[in-house]
Amino acid sequence: MSKILIIGQQADGKLSSSIAKVVTAAKLIGGDIEVAVFAKDGSAAAAEAAKLDGVTKVLQIDRPENDHGLAAVLAPQVVELAKKGYTHVFAPGTTFGKDLLPRVAAKLGVQQVSDVMAVHGPTSFDRPIYAGNAIVTVEAPAAPAVVATIRLASFSAVGSSGAAPVEKTSIDVALPTHTRFIKLEAQKSERPELQSATRVVSGGRALGSSENFKVIYDLADKLKAGVGASRAAVDSGYVPNDMQVGQTGKIIAPELYFAIGISGAIQHLAGIKDARTIVAINKDAEAPIFEVADFGLVADLFTAVPEMTSKL
Amino acid sequence: MKALVSVKRVVDYNVRIQVKPDGSGVVTEGVKFSVNPFDEIAMEEAVRLKEKGKITEIIAVTIGGAKCEETLRTALAFGADRAVHVKEEGEIQPLTAAQALAAVFKKEGANLFLLGKQAIDDDANQTGQMVAALLDLPQATFASKVELEATKATVTREVDAGLETLEIDLPAIITADLRLNEPRYLKLPDIMKAKKKPIEAVSLADLGITAGAGLKATKTAAPPKRSKGIVVKTVDDLIAALKGKGLI
């Protein structure tokens, strides 16, 4: 039977919402599902993890060094833990999981499976390659363990009506001091963060200037949405490049996506493939974006978008 | 200070990826190949650090078949002083690549290893972290800013929550994210000069590495196509449609 270890990402003692999605992927394999919380004081995060449906046990590993979730510090502890009969080690496909898990896999001597998007069995998974332009099914060696990061856009979250036991434990292993946390500057925007927003409004080259982007911000604020942009809008200097959605920018999967004044180049479509619903507003009825949009409106954005904002 | 930079030959990012009809992979015959864009950023960073006098020698390294020589020539044109070509015609997965790169890093006695955060073909995002693990060295992944001193580096990382700053002791591994820099355009004299720079060939066996089991690809498929939706006439119709679906 499978025994799955999930690395319970936390920040400031709070469990990451990604873990509820990783549990969904783990449940598709079945067996015991244990969440390990590494923190300075992981009590609150462990309690949250214990409620997730399907979790059979939570391990709480408190240590001052675990405070900032540094890969070099966590990896030796995860490796020690993983050797205790686990068949799988899973982490979320966040920057935290992507930083940490290959370090664990290398120490265990196994090839990691990155960005699992479908589970076919204990060792068979789908993962995206070429920015999601192809999907490969891979068979991972079962021994010593399957090590994988889980692509969050592909799994929904489990409920939280469970009550798994929390076990405080310690892992006796020497930790390196060669990596030191200095600071974290959180994104200051009042708007939802692009990658986790359930709604995103993006503008393209047709906006014409950074001043004109105001119509995009206004609609986004009305919808409580994050704001993105096409590469063309970024290259034209209308918005900073951390707003770029697409293959070389951010790959997102919101519930609702507005592509406004965006023609729909391959590079942009690669970044929004997994959006649940795509709405396109564009003056050009022939724009490729209409080929993938669930709802299209052929209109001048400078009249349609303010009208929409005022009517919502 | 010696820096090692690894570069991977990948299908160019502008190529429209076609999955082979028999599901055995993607079409790589007759398509344009380039240096992995993230590795190019890593190379540019190394060159800038050398221009600032922080690095004395840049060694480019790649793993792959004969065609990867052009990848190394590009790296040499950027400003690498010499190159190491780990020759292997077969498929290389990240763990094997990391073992080979770790061996080269040790052999060269380098102090800094720069590489892209991921390659845009397999999108694995593993190699840098694995090299760091195998050598028990610090890692700073997804770097958007690097400040190098004699015995340590301060690195700003692009993480989900914002920008994280780490201080790491050297030797160390740093993986480059998109915003670290904008690679320069190569000039003809540099491309000519690169042709005369030395490339040393080694095999995995020379480095004492045997490729492990790894993942077995059983099928490659195109992603599901989105179907075309409906076109509405007015803003009111659009709002009604979205409300009807419970989306707003």
Image (cartoon, coloured by chain):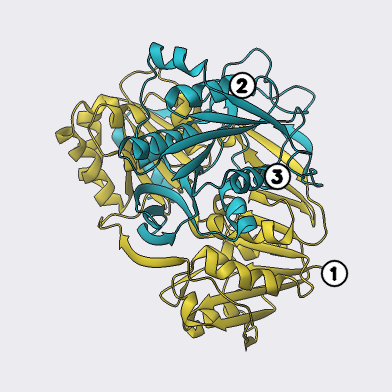
Chain colours: A yellow, B cyan
Residue wearing tag 3 = A126
Q: Please name whichever residue, A5 or A296, is drawn nearer the observer in this view of the structure.
A: A5
Tell me the distance, in whole angstroms, between the alpha carbons under discs 2 and 3. Answer: 32 Å
Above or below, A173 relative to A267? below
- Within 10 angstroms of label 1, few (less than 14), some, or many (20 or more) residues? few
- Give coordinates of residue B177: x percent, y percent: 43, 43
Among the 4 quarters of the image, the one containing residue A174: bottom right
Q: Looking at the picture, which amino acid does disc 1 mark?
A: Met
- Give coordinates of residue A99: x percent, y percent: 53, 56
In the rendered view, does B45 fall on the left or right side of A27?
Answer: left
Looking at the rendered image, the disc whose residue lies closer to the viewer, 2 or 1, is 2
Tell me the distance, in whole angstroms, between the alpha carbons under discs 3 and 1. Answer: 22 Å
Residue wearing tag 1 = A1
Q: Please name whichever residue, A216 or B56, is drawn nearer the observer in this view of the structure.
A: B56
Chain under callout 3: A
> Looking at the image, which residue is at 52% across and 15% down?
B195
Looking at the rendered image, the disc whose residue lies closer to the viewer, 2 or 3, is 2
